[in-house]
Image (cartoon, rainbow, N blue to C red):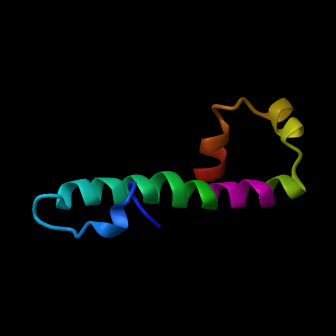
Amino acid sequence: MELKPFGNSINVSKENCKEFVDLFIKFDVFTQAETRLDAFWKGFTRFIDPLVLQTLFDIEELPTLLCG
């Protein structure tokens, strides 16, 4: 997976190391975490209808209920 256009042809060096780390973290947080959260939500909504959740809880309460 390329982190930036034509990134596969660029070697990581001292000069571009910070950019690489920033791009990698962005990729991991936004792409990998999003994929895992999407999978969780898809499985979760197989058992609980999102419309039912909206009637039971405010959207602001859900992270606390799910994560503690």
**Magenta span main SS:** helix
Residue 15 versus residue 11 in the image, above or below: above
Q: What residue do we see at 19% from left, 56% from top?
A: 18
Residue 3 versus residue 59 in the image, above or below: below
For the residue pair 23 and 32, the one nearer the viewer reads as: 23
Residue 12 versus residue 55 in the image, above or below: below
For the residue pair 37 and 24, the one nearer the viewer reads as: 24
Q: Magenta segment, which residues?
A: 37-43
Where residue 19 sits: x, y (%)?
A: 24, 54
Question: For this view, does 44 lie left or right of residue 46?
Answer: left
Image quadrant where residue 15 sits: bottom left
Q: What residue do we see at 79% from left, 61% from top?
A: 43
Q: What residue do we see at 10% from left, 64% from top?
A: 14
Where residue 33 sits: x, y (%)?
A: 54, 57
Q: Does 8 appear in magenta?
A: no
Residue 61 versus residue 21 in the image, above or below: above
Say how many tags the image has: 0
Image quadrant where residue 21 sits: bottom left
